[in-house]
Every structure is written in C-alpha cells, then in structure tokens.
C-alpha cells in the first residue's frame, strides 16, 4: 500500500510540475507575441520617420519657398 501511495503522490507532483511548465510556456508565448507586435509598431514608426525626412518640406510653394522665392 505504501508503494502505491508513494507512486500516486509522485504522479501528482509530476502533474503539478507539468501544469506549471505549461502555464509558464503560455505566459512566455503571450509576452513574445506582445514583443513582436511592439517591434512591428516601432518599425512602422521608423519607416514613417525615414520617409518623411527624405521628402521636401511640405509647405506652400514647395522647394521654391526654401530658396527664398516664395
């Protein structure tokens, strides 16, 4: 009877460790997905900033205004 009880307790502890590992895995997956989304958002912001820094000034008269003719 003692051997059986010890086996049952060990199986229970193993199941608890498995549940804890699965919970941690799920949490890490959620955090990774959040990090990927944040990275994509930041990449988009960088692209917008790079694109806007390459454009001529967006003011009435365009380039001629920057040369003092507007």
Image (cartoon, rainbow, N blue to C red):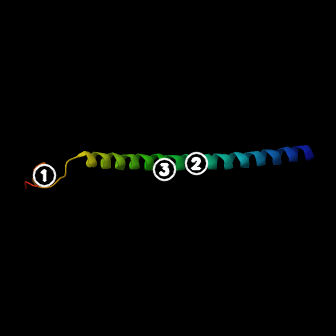
Q: Nearer the viewer, residue 51 or 41?
A: 51
Q: Position of residue 7 (x, y in %)?
A: 85, 43
Q: Is residue 31 visible?
A: yes
- Give the spatial CA distance, label 2 vs label 3: 10 Å
Disc 2, SS: helix
Q: Which mark is residue 12?
A: none
**Are dots 2 and 1 in contact, CB under 8 Å?**
no
Residue at 64% across, 46% down: 22
Q: Residues within 10 Å of mark 1 (few under 14, many from 20)?
A: few
Residue 45 as seen in the image, left or right of residue 3 = left
Q: Position of residue 61 (x, y in %)?
A: 9, 53
Residue at 33% across, 45% down: 47
Residue at 48% across, 50% down: 34
Q: Is residue 1 visible?
A: no
**Are dots 1 and 3 in contact, CB under 8 Å?**
no
Q: Position of residue 51 (x, y in %)?
A: 28, 45
- Give the spatial CA distance, label 1 vs label 3: 46 Å
Give the labeled residue for mark 3. 34
Quarter containing the C terminus: bottom left
Disc 1, SS: loop
Give the labeled residue for mark 1. 67
- Can you tell which of label 2 and label 1 is closer to the viewer? 1
- Give the spatial CA distance, label 2 vs label 1: 55 Å
Q: Nearer the viewer, residue 5 or 39?
A: 39
Which is more N-terminal, label 3 or label 2? 2
Residue 31 as seen in the image, left or right of residue 57 = right
């Amino acid at each position: 009877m003692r051997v059986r009880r010890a086996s049952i307790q060990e199986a229970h502890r193993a199941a608890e460790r498995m549940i804890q590992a699965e919970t941690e895995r799920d949490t890490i997956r959620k955090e990774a997905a959040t990090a990927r989304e944040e990275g994509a958002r930041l990449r988009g912001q960088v692209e917008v900033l790079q694109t806007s820094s390459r454009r001529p000034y967006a003011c009435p008269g365009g380039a001629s205004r920057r040369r003092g003719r507007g």
